[in-house]
Image (cartoon, rainbow, N blue to C red):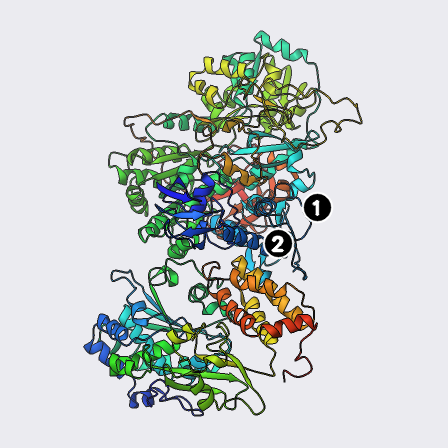
């Protein structure tokens, strides 16, 4: 730490950081554009200029950029110095030369960093009397809108897209005051994290194209702290609504999980909540549900429903008649993951993955199976060069200097997968193989690390190289998962982590609450199919995505009554006698356990119109969410800690609830005036310390119940600066969520079941799933923007096999287009996961594939 | 008077090939260095010669070479800045077209002194003839075993590549040039780290101008003391000076460092054309402050021109006569700088665009009260350290000095709503 004098007052700043970081961490108002906490300093915009003095006798001083100047001991600067103030004002004036006066029709208006900074610097009068430069805009796909005339050339977009995300199709073109940020021609932006540009851009060049369809100003949005429901990573989201419909999702900062960024599925998958397929009314006789209490019903839970909803069903039908609703293989994999995590290896948070200096990915195409985690892995490969740069006294935050030093050097990152992955471009080495060969590689790596770990008969090429890298690293991480359906891969990953103590072990799980459901320990769908009962209650689960249609048909036919609770109509709800409308993420509250083992609470953003309600409300007679949480904690000791995931309903600040609406929320008295001129009483929320109101304490709430980031003068998302303990650090009041697993001391016995090598069989193919960020997940694929990006069904094979098949192949009684995936091993075919008509197949499986006749 | 740099340069004939260059004493310095001198002693010799960088900034060359740390990793690079894009400047072209082997030998000596493994000549794209001749010289040097592995049996090896620029002024800024060589946008880099520590492809790199490197063979051959004595000032050696504008004999001359402005202008360039009066000159390319009548006896070297309020820069002066509009001239230059701004830092890309439009408006009779104050503010806005690189501070120099020396002319443009020279007076 260093003592830095700002306007003659001493402050303590982190001496490994720059002055801008230091000033912002101290909650000072110093304007900036090109700097971003996740992207570091490049000194382009010159907006954060301050006066620096050599010593206390220096009267003149000189202007320096705070973002480019280390916060060294004894540094003396002035923010208030008149020349520095004038300089910053001139920079804004320069940035505004070409900026259109279109704030009233700009989507960014009201949460625009450029607006905020312009007001902060006091530039309020246009003196430039010449023509502004103009550009043509591009079509960039269904997620982002492009309006280049607003650009202020801060370069954040290309730095984020190219340098941070590894994207290749967004460029800076041309020079001088006409730099153009776009693609070489119109087209969908290829990178899976492009959507964050809407928040990375400090003004309205890149804006949320889905939100544009149902646009509302930030100040008119009711917002709530929520969680992404589209994979198992558990990213924080802020859901926003007005007039009862979800308007958009923005990132909800969590230093341990998603940091500043979401994946595009997480940001844009929300529109299903207003889908025409929503179930909005109950259908059937509600008495059926009451009758189910008698002990004649069985319940099937869901890995996409909250813990509370699952537990409420379990409670209703009785623990012994509650089934997890996962396919048997998936349930076995999850049980195995839990067993492994009760061992000595720690599940790293995404931040820890980002800081890892050696990563092995075993069997996952992370960008498609746990997208946000892939973005963290992409940062991890910089750790080595960051350390190297530090040895040359180039600080980590000096972003371009570090990158110029690093050039293309990166790693180590080893990727063992069935086919190509979206991280291959930064891999030290890639390995392709059938699941069991990937597992064999993993077992071999473990054996090289610790001879006590069993070895396959021959050590595959590359195992020693991987082992060496993991051994050398200070913070190695192994990532494996359930995607390929292989328990051997999980065991191999565990062996590696145990063979090299200190290795983080991250598992990819399929759905938002796969981990939570697994922790409840209920038997899987296979067991349910053997169970008897009079009534079947299915909770937020389309069984036709869990098992082949014929099996599900047979199973459902065995029950006299079928009750389904869900938010969207699907094949299962069609078969139900009683269908109850369940809340989506926007309308419901509950607890989810992420793949890290972090229990986090999501709060609804709106009170849905009756009869839509939380599934747990249909199933249990709790007075509120907290009662359910308390019951869960009492009944299931492994989940006892979830009570600490967020403050309970009774939490108050100065006696008041936390308002979900900003204090400038408009139209409160007029919004429903066509129905009644009397302002309706806001709905009560018995489940959260949050109110459906603009009234409440202005003090910052605890992180887990912060509905939005706003402070005076900071209307954009970058207000998050003011909510952090330090920039890019934890939110004040603690990191949201609570970790349920911590490593258990003591060695574990290595797994010994090493599979035999994969042998291709004549005429028969091993079909593995290929996850797709867009399309594989059940709910987001019902959102129009995501649906537009989802692939159709196909079967992928390597070049030789594709030549043999031609354009179409026949498999499992269907004709499907053939795609070339040149890296797939011989004898292995791949189909997109979760995409009809093969969504119910339990993969991998072996089947013949023929050229279509 | 000795003219070692241009002794082989013929105004018309093709440059000396390897044989002719060798017969004139060429590559003797390289032989001497490889056989008799350690890399450190080459650096010491160059230090002792007081050779200062001829690209414009005048950084001591020997000192620059010693900035590559002893234990610096390999590969190390030498990059020769031959992107001669400073308006009014054509001195490096003289060497590259007239005696390319001299440059090649200088590059190899620099490589030896700094332990470089490869060298690049980054050449201005428009210099087609120079490209041809330098490429030829490099090929010949390989044939003569002056390049490649194990040069002249010394154990030292160097590869030399010619890179022709796609053509932007920014590529002449040394770190912009490194980015361009790496195939990236020619934006400048943040310093520190400096190129001797993190340079081309992230490796230690020594960057020198063509004329600078071409001096090195002569220093090695004749010694530091001889070199210092060539000069009339503290900065060692000779200098290729040039004059453009409406003088009787525009051109270039290799003269002792420190020759006065007057001698160059009146004796060598023959003074102003008949009927024209001298009003001022930019001493070393477009990005230097105007000097006027009162400065004619200033010796042209790095120190003295600076004392006079300008910079020697490239030493190739642009002369302005009394029938040329100073506002028009500064507009032309500002137009160039505004166009060539890389677009990275705000004061540069936005400020230059604004200044250029004001100057254009003044020339077109649309100047307004307050414009001069605006322009003056802009020149201060572009002060070194406030912008990311030296482009905008360089652009400020002709503008700020024109506002100082020719203020009446600017005011007249606004007052009279037009350019007084507009009726063909600018000729």
Is residue B177 or residue A557 the one in the foreground? B177
Q: Is A339 left, or right, of A134 in this rendering?
A: left
The correct choice, above or below, for A846 with respect to B229 in the image is above
Vertical placement of B231 versus A463: above or below? Answer: below
The residue tagged with tag 1: helix, strand or loop? helix
User: How many other residues sit within 10 Å of disc 1, few (<14), some (14-19) or many (≥20)?
Assistant: few
Residue B273 visible within the image: yes
Where residue A489 appears, x then y in whole percent?
A: 39, 36
Question: For the residues marked 2 and 1, what is the alpha-carbon distance in whole angstroms?
Answer: 17 Å
Q: Earlier in the sequence, mark 2 or mark 1?
A: 2
- Circle 2 SS class: loop
Query: In the shown orientation, is residue A713 left or right of residue B250?
Result: right
Residue at x 63%, y 33% (from the top left corner): A240
Which quadrant would the N terminus of chain A be assigned to in this image? top left
Q: In the rendered image, which residue does mark 1 sit on?
A: A105
**Residue under pointer 2:** A96
User: B24 above or below A233?
Assistant: below
In the depicted view, which residue is nearer to us: A239 or A337? A239
Chain for numbered disc 2? A
Evaluate whether residue A174 shows in this view.
no
> Where is residue A9, by image quadrant?
top left
Tag 2 near tag 1, CB within 8 Å: no
Residue A747 position, x and y percent, is 27, 28
């Amino acid at each position: 730490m260093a003592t830095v004098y700002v306007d003659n007052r001493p402050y303590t700043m982190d001496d490994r950081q720059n002055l801008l970081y230091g000033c912002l961490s101290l909650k000072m108002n110093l304007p900036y554009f090109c700097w971003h906490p996740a992207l570091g300093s490049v000194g382009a915009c010159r907006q954060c200029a301050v006066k620096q003095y050599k010593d206390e006798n220096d009267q003149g001083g000189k202007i320096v950029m705070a973002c480019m100047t280390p916060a060294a001991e004894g540094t003396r600067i002035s923010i208030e110095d008149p020349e520095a103030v004038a300089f910053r004002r001139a920079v804004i004036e320069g940035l505004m030369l070409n900026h259109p006066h279109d704030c009233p029709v700009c989507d960014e208006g009201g949460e625009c960093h450029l607006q905020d900074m312009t007001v902060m610097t006091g530039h309020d009068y246009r003196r430039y009397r010449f023509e502004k430069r103009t550009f043509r805009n591009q079509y960039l796909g269904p997620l982002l809108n492009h309006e280049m005339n607003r650009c202020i050339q801060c370069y954040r977009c290309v730095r984020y897209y190219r340098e941070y995300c590894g994207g290749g199709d967004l460029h800076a073109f041309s020079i001088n005051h006409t730099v153009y940020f776009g693609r070489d021609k119109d087209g969908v932006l290829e990178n899976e994290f492009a959507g964050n540009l809407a928040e990375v851009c400090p003004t309205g060049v890149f804006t949320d194209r889905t939100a544009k369809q149902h646009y509302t100003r930030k100040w008119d949005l009711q917002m709530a702290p929520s969680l992404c429901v589209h994979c198992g990573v558990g990213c924080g989201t802020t859901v926003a609504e007005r007039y009862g419909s979800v308007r958009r999702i923005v990132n909800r900062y969590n230093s341990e999980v998603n940091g500043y960024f979401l994946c595009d599925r997480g940001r844009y998958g929300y529109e299903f909540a207003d889908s025409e397929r929503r179930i909005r009314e109950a259908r059937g006789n509600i008495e059926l549900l009451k009758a189910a209490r008698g002990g004649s019903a069985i319940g099937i839970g869901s890995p996409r429903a909250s813990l509370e909803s699952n537990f409420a069903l379990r409670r209703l039908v009785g623990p012994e008649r509650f089934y997890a609703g996962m396919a048997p293989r998936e349930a076995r994999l999850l049980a195995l993951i839990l067993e492994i995590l009760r061992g000595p290896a720690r599940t790293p948070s995404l931040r820890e993955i980002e800081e890892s200096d050696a990563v092995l990915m075993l069997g996952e195409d992370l960008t498609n199976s746990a997208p946000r985690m892939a973005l963290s892995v992409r940062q991890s490969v910089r750790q080595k060069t960051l350390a190297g740069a530090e040895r040359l006294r180039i600080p980590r935050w000096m972003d371009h200097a570090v990158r110029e030093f690093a050039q293309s050097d990166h790693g180590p990152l080893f990727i063992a997968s069935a086919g190509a992955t979206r991280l291959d471009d930064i891999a030290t080495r890639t390995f392709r193989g059938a699941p069991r060969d990937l597992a064999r590689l993993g077992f071999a790596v473990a054996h090289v690390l610790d001879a006590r770990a069993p070895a396959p008969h021959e050590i595959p090429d590359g195992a020693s190289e991987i082992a060496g890298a993991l051994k050398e690293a200070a913070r190695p991480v192994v990532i494996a998962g359930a995607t390929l359906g292989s328990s051997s891969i999980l065991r191999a990953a565990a062996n590696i982590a145990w063979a090299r103590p200190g290795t983080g072990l991250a598992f990819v799980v399929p759905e938002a609450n796969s981990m939570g459901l697994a922790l409840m320990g209920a038997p899987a769908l296979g067991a349910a199919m053997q169970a008897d009962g009079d009534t079947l209650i299915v909770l937020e689960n389309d069984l036709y995505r869990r098992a082949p249609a014929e099996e599900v048909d047979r199973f459902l036919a065995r029950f006299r009554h079928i009750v389904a609770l869900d938010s969207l109509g699907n094949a299962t709800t069609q078969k139900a006698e009683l269908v109850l409308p369940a809340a989506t993420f926007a309308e419901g509250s509950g607890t989810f356990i992420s793949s890290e083992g972090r229990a986090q609470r999501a709060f609804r953003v709106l009170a849905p119109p009756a009869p839509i309600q939380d599934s747990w409300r249909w199933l249990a007679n709790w007075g509120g969410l907290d009662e359910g949480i308390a019951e869960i904690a009492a009944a299931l000791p492994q989940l006892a800690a979830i009570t600490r995931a967020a403050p309970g309903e009774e939490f108050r600040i100065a006696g008041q609830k936390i308002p979900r609406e900003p204090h400038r929320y408009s139209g409160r008295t007029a919004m429903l005036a066509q129905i009644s001129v009397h302002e309706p009483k806001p709905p009560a929320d018995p489940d959260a310390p949050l109110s459906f109101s603009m009234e409440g304490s202005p003090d910052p709430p605890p992180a887990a119940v912060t509905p939005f980031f706003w402070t005076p003068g900071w209307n954009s998302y970058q207000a998050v600066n003011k909510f952090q303990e330090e920039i890019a650090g934890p939110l004040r009041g603690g990191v949201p969520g609570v970790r349920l697993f911590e490593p258990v001391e003591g060695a574990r016995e290595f797994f010994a079941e090493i599979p035999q090598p994969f042998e291709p069989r004549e005429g028969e193919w091993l079909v593995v799933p290929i996850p797709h960020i867009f399309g594989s997940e059940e709910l987001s694929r019902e959102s129009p923007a995501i649906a537009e990006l989802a692939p159709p069904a196909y079967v992928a094979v390597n070049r030789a096999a594709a030549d043999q098949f031609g354009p179409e192949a026949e498999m499992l009684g269907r004709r499907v287009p053939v795609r070339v995936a040149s890296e797939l091993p011989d004898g292995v075919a791949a189909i997109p996961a979760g995409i009809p008509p093969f969504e119910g197949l339990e993969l991998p499986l072996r089947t013949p594939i023929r050229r279509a006749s | 008077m000795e003219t070692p740099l241009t002794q082989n340069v013929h105004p018309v004939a093709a440059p000396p090939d390897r044989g002719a260059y060798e017969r004139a004493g060429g590559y003797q310095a390289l032989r001497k260095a490889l056989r008799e001198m350690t890399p450190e002693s080459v650096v010491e010799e160059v230090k002792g010669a007081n050779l200062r960088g001829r690209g414009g900034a005048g950084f001591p060359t020997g000192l620059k070479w010693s900035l590559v740390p002893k234990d610096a990793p390999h590969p190390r690079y030498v990059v020769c800045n031959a992107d001669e894009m400073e308006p009014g400047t054509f001195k490096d072209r003289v060497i590259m077209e007239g005696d390319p082997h001299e440059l090649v030998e200088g590059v190899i000596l620099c490589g030896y002194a700094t332990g470089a493994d490869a060298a690049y000549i980054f050449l201005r794209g428009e210099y087609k003839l120079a490209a041809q001749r330098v490429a030829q010289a490099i090929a010949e040097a390989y044939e003569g075993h002056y390049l490649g592995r194990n040069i002249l049996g010394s154990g030292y090896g160097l590869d030399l590549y010619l890179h022709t620029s796609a053509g932007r002024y920014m590529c002449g800024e040394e770190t912009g040039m490194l980015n361009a060589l790496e195939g990236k946008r020619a934006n400048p880099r943040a310093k520190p780290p400096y190129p001797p520590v993190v340079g081309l492809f992230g490796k230690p790199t020594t960057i020198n101008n063509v004329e600078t490197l071409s001096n090195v063979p002569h220093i090695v051959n004749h010694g530091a003391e001889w070199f210092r004595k060539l000069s009339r000032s503290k900065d060692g050696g000779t200098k290729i000076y040039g004059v453009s504008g409406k003088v009787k004999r525009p051109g270039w001359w290799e003269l002792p460092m420190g020759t006065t402005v007057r001698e160059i202008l009146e004796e060598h360039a023959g003074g102003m054309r008949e009927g024209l009066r001298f009003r001022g000159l930019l001493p070393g390319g477009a990005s230097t402050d105007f000097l006027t009548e009162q400065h004619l006896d200033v010796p042209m070297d790095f120190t003295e021109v600076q004392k006079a309020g300008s910079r020697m820069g490239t030493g190739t002066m642009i002369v302005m006569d009394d029938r040329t509009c100073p506002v028009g001239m500064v507009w032309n230059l500002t137009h160039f700088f505004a166009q060539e701004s890389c677009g990275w830092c705000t004061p540069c890309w936005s400020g230059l665009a604004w200044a250029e439009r004001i100057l254009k408006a003044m020339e077109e009779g649309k100047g307004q009260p307050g414009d001069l104050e605006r322009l003056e503010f802009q020149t201060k806005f572009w002060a070194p350290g406030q912008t990311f690189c030296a482009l905008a501070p360089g652009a400020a120099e002709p503008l700020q000095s024109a506002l100082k020396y020719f203020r009446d002319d600017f005011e007249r443009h606004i007052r009279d709503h037009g350019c007084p020279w507009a009726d063909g007076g600018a000729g």
